[in-house]
Image (tube, rainbow, N blue to C red):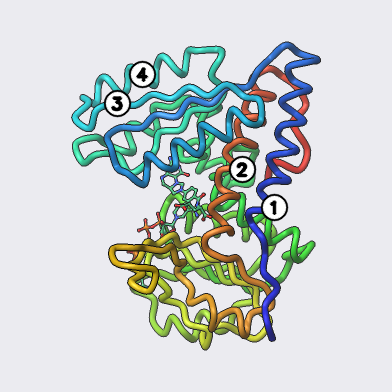
Amino acid sequence: MTAQVIDGKAFAAKVRDKVAGHVARLKEENGITPGLAVVLVGEDPASQVYVRSKGKQTVEVGMNSFEHKLAADTAEADLLNLIQQLNNDPQVHGILVQLPLPDHLNEDLVINSIAPEKDVDGFHISNVGLLGTGQKSMVPCTPLGCLMMLRDHHGSLSGMDAVVIGRSNIVGKPMAQLLLGDSCTVTIAHSRTKDLADVVRRADIVVAAVGRPEMVPGDWIKDGATVIDVGINRIDAPEKGEGKTRLVGDVHYESAAAVAGAITPVPGGVGPMTIACLLANTVTACCRANGLAEPEGLTA
Ligand SMILES: NC(=O)C1=CN([C@@H]2O[C@H](COP(=O)(O)OP(=O)(O)OC[C@H]3O[C@@H](n4cnc5c(N)ncnc54)[C@H](OP(=O)(O)O)[C@@H]3O)[C@@H](O)[C@H]2O)C=CC1
Ligand SMILES: Nc1nc(=O)c2c([nH]1)NC[C@@H]1CN(c3ccc(C(=O)N[C@@H](CCC(=O)O)C(=O)O)cc3)C=[N+]21
């Protein structure tokens, strides 16, 4: 089977259009402009690229973007103070603290200091608990984007065998919760999993979120399975010229695309959906904060 390519870039553009429509209505009918605050600590080049891209897309859909860039050696108390200010600022409906944080900062403490209703990443312990118990929450952007693409492709996911490779708090675990919520039979694999190849071969849906370039080969994929590749790995690309690099996923794309039913590419798959879902979560947060009806089709 040759896989259908799931075009995350095109899907993300549609999600952003919907978001822009809701933003326009909020402005016109309610006089409210949704606002997203992004906090970046330090100068990690990849993080700087993501933050710039988020800011640009936030403005493009008509929302306010507030960027806070702090020095790498910022004291924890100063960061917590800034978050407190943003929590209290009625212009700010969503807060994102870019991860990873420098080592001297306690990531859990920082994330849990964000007001849960403004936690558009869905990383706060309240949101994690709400998601785990099937209650209304803020859903982490990357897994939400994956779920939207899966639902769009399959309609119902009920009864499907899903394998999530990776158990991080930001991707693997919430992804597994969402798939369970849609009645998949879910397996979570990780670095201690025995016979990973055999586990993956049983899956109708494979979500790879590991951070190891091209570690999942095509011969692990069941014929016709749907493959969602979350990995973003920059590797050397001497074929493009000296010192050049390129992005690859956690799945070996060519061999997997030869057997899968559908597959997301890297780049142009999950990545763009992550940012689109961040914007969607910000509109959702804004509507909830103002007691307005939630936008349809933008939440889990
Ligand atoms: N597209 C997007 O929007 C986003 C992409 N990413 C990308 O997704 C990938 C994963 O990110 P993240 O979840 O933060 O990563 P983490 O490093 O936090 O987690 C990686 C997971 O993979 C598991 N793992 C590591 N090695 C193996 C192995 N050999 N076999 C099976 N499992 C293994 C680890 O297991 P264990 O727990 O046992 O150590 C861990 O659970 C990265 O490439 C990241 O860049 C991340 C966020 C957003
Ligand atoms: N608090 C927090 N929330 C996050 O959601 C978060 C984070 N911290 N830290 C880092 C990871 C990573 N992440 C990505 C977002 C978009 C792309 C993306 O748009 N990728 C493009 C390619 C971009 C490029 O060319 O480098 C694509 O896949 O097509 C990738 C990765 C969000 N993360």
Return the x and y of residue 120 as percentages of the image width and height.
Answer: 54, 34
Label 1, ligand 2: CB separation under 8 Å: no
Return the x and y of residue 100 as percentages of the image width and height.
Answer: 33, 44
Among the two numbered marks 3 and 2 on one chain, the one whose residue lies closer to the N terminus: 3
Label 4, ligand 2: CB separation under 8 Å: no
Which residue corresponds to the image point at 36% horizontal and 32% vertical from the top-left?
40
| Element assignment for label 4 | helix
Return the x and y of residue 176 as percentages of the image width and height.
Answer: 55, 59
Crowd class of label 3 (few under 14; some 14 to 19; many from 20; radius 10 Å):
some
Which residue corresponds to the image point at 65% horizontal and 86% vertical from the top-left?
223
Among the two numbered marks 3 and 4 on one chain, the one whose residue lies closer to the N terminus: 3
Crowd class of label 1 (few under 14; some 14 to 19; many from 20; radius 10 Å):
many
Q: Which amino acid, mark 3? A: Leu
Among the two numbered marks 4 and 2 on one chain, the one whose residue lies closer to the N terminus: 4
The answer to whether the residue labelled 1 contacts the one labelled 2, judged by CB atoms less than 8 Å apart, is yes
Q: Which amino acid, mark 4? A: Leu
Residue at image mark 1? 11
Residue at image mark 2? 276
| Element assignment for label 2 | helix
Q: CA distance from mark 4 to mark 2?
A: 25 Å
Residue at image mark 4? 82
Residue at image mark 3? 70
Return the x and y of residue 181 as percentages of the image width and height.
Answer: 65, 55
Question: Image height check: is 19 above or below 224?
Answer: above
The quadrant of the rendering that contains the N terminus is bottom right
Specify the label residue 37 is tagged with: none
Question: Image height check: is 171 above or below 183?
Answer: above
